[in-house]
């Protein structure tokens, strides 16, 4: 499995109202957690064990 890193700046307050910026940042964090959980769930138990995880760890790590 290849690892990748996405560099995405947080949405700042600037000209955007703070409430909108907070909402967008939470949306981005939620999507990142969803993608992480999906990727980890696709791994086999052996692959998870190789990186020191179990299926029970996936939800905690993703959030």
Image (cartoon, rainbow, N blue to C red):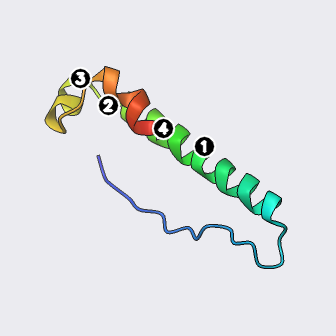
Give the spatial CA distance, label 3 vs label 1. 25 Å
Residue hosting label 3: 45
Disc 1 target residue = 30
Residue at left offset 41%, top offset 62%:
5
Q: Does residue 11 lie above or below 63 as drawn? A: below
Residue beneath disc 2: 43
Front residue of this view, candidates 33 and 41: 33
Nearer-the-camera pick, 3 or 21: 21
Mark 4 or 3, which is nearer the eye? 4
The residue that appears at 23% across and 23% down in the rendered structure is 45
- The tag on residue 63 is 4
Callout 1 secondary element: helix
The answer for how far apart the CA atoms under marks 1 and 4 are is 8 Å
* Residue located at (32% from left, 31% from top): 43
Label 3: how many residues lie within 10 Å, few (<14), some (14-19) or many (20+)? few
Residue depicted at 81% across the width and 59% down the height: 20
């Amino acid at each position: 499995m290849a690892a990748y890193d996405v560099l995405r700046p947080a949405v700042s307050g600037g000209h955007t109202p703070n409430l909108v910026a907070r909402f967008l940042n939470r949306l981005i964090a939620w999507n990142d957690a969803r993608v992480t959980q999906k990727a980890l769930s696709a791994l086999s138990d052996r692959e998870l064990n190789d990186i020191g995880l179990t299926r029970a760890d996936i939800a905690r790590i993703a959030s």
